[in-house]
Image (tube, rainbow, N blue to C red):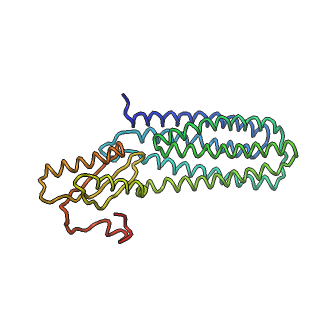
Amino acid sequence: MLSVQEKNNRLKKTAALGSITLAVILCVLKGSGAFISGSLAVLSSMIDSLSDIVASLITFWAVKVSGRPASCDYRYGYGKVEALSAVVQALFIAMSGAYVLYDAILRLAKHQVLQQTDFGLAVMIISMVLTIGLVVFQRYVAKVTKSKAILADSMHYSVDILTNGAIIISLGIIKIWQINWIDAVMAIAVAIYLLYSAYDLAKESIPLLLDRELSEDIRSNVLKIIRSHHLKPEVHDLRTHDLGGIYMFEFHLELDGKLDLATAHNYTAEIEEMVREAYPEAQVIIHQEPQGIDDERLDNRLSGAKCRN
């Protein structure tokens, strides 16, 4: 029977492969639509899909690597590869947005007239339907596995849903009222949204690479679990971070200094198990020390009274 981690890895790989397949299909469809219709908005969407192919390949690689077990050289595992891939994807999105923005400004100056808007409309509608199906599946996988890479990929395609809808509206306006400049304006809007998405994605991923503490709710719950043990132990210097879907908790546990080593170990093992029950597969590191010892504490060095104990 597969473990939770193995099931999650299988789900993530399926989502990543689905993303690559759809990105190729969309790129071909939108490329044809842009060539026949002459629409910059459709071309901007095709460029985004092209960047999605590269980004999806990066995601698939990241999911594959992050699922590896810990090794001698990487004893915390490879989970953070997913956050790294999300940062790389943010760069791709930003470059795509910058290119589209530049091209749209040039197009506005040329006053280019569009042809064959019907074909462009058909391509964008098909693309939108396919993209909605993928995003629904990706969001499910990201929720179950807590994968940053899959979540990042779903953000790409969520943007595509919005931009596809906007492009469909602009092509409809051009077809009915012959307002051709709306195509370049829509492309500019797509470019701005791409740049914002790149910023938002990097903002979420970079803190993970820098080992930002987990949320206050998780920290408070861990402390509550520890103190619910029948010994009612004190705890300090709690440090938490995300290894890429797997949480890690480190803390100092204060125990009666008269306890023998075996008893102290048994109590510590009980507390570790309690934490693992709440956060399955979490890595827990506990430093035991006698109660009342006057030692230098990380809590005191960080932010004084504002530090979370």
Residue 14 % position (x, y):
50, 33
Instruction: Let me know if residue 192 appears in the view.
Output: yes
Q: Residue furthest right?
A: 177
| Left or right: 77 as drawn, with respect to 172 | left
Quadrant where the N terminus sits is: top left
| Left or right: 97 as drawn, with respect to 307 | right
Identify the residue at horizontal 35%, vertical 39% (top origin).
69
| Left or right: 17 as drawn, with respect to 97 | left
Residue 108, above or below 44: below
Residue 169 % position (x, y):
77, 44
Residue 232, above or below 60: below
Identify the residue at horizontal 69%, vertical 50% (top origin).
190
Residue 224 % position (x, y):
33, 55
Q: Nearer the viewer, residue 26 or 150?
A: 150
Identify the residue at horizontal 63%, vertical 54% (top origin).
195
The total number of labels drawn is: 0
The quarter holding residue 232 reads: bottom left
Residue 254 % position (x, y):
22, 59
Instruction: Let me know if residue 210 appears in the view.
Output: no
